[in-house]
Image (spheres, rainbow, N blue to C red):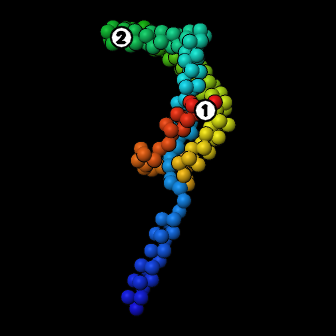
Amino acid sequence: MVSVTRKLCAAFLLSILSAASFAQGKVVILDVQAAMLGTELAKQNLTKLDKDPEYAAMKAKLDGLVADMKNLQAAAEKDGMTWSAEEQAEHRKKVEYLRADYELAGKKLQAERQAVMQRVMQDLTPKTRTVLEQLIAADNIGLVLNSQAAIHAAPAFDITQKLTDMLNKAK
């Protein structure tokens, strides 16, 4: 009885393994967003944003706020022990104002950058679908998984850079 069970299990495993070996295509992972944002088009748009006078002014303001906060921190470390309660309260108020300004400027910069990246992704979506279909056919890919869904994948299974390269070459 045990022998028959072993033979049935072995036959079952062999049938599963042979079916798996006949499966078409390979399994790969892909980060579509990274592929799109790694293109020359995305880099050009982000460079254009960095050169925009309004964006550069906001960035300079943010850098100035960082410097002001560091100066206030240095002053507090140097002279804070000698300050009266009123001076300490005034210092805290200045720090809070600077922090609020910093957060607002940072959010504005981030929103501008996000808008550019979103526009690039919208522009590239149709081309990405076409190029990805070509890549799937050319490389005999049977399954494409989102790279964030994979727990582990060797770099050889990641086609993100390959898709980026193909997007750069596609017209």
Element under disc 1: loop
The foreground one among 89 and 112 is 112
Q: Residue 21: where, in percent of width, then height? A: 48, 65
Q: Quadrant of the N terminus?
A: bottom left
Mark 2 packing: few (<14 Cα in 10 Å), some, or many (20+)? few
| Viewer can see residue 147 | no
**Can you tell which quarter of the image residue 47 is in?**
top right
Q: Residue at x 54, y 23 (%)?
A: 43
Q: Quadrant of the C terminus?
A: top right
Q: Amino acid at mark 2?
A: Ala
Q: Residue at x 58, y 17 (%)?
A: 49
The foreground one among 23 and 70 is 23
Question: Which residue does the numbered mark 2 point to in the structure image?
Answer: 74
Q: Residue 42: where, in percent of width, then height? A: 57, 26
Question: Which residue does the numbered mark 1 point to in the structure image?
Answer: 170
Q: Earlier in the sequence, mark 1 or mark 2?
A: 2
Q: Residue at x 48, y 9 (%)?
A: 64
Instruction: Count all numbered tags in the image, as a single digit.
Output: 2
Numbered tag placed on residue 146 in the rendering: none
Q: Residue at x 43, y 10 (%)?
A: 67
The span from disc 1 to disc 2 (Cα, nearest Å) is 53 Å
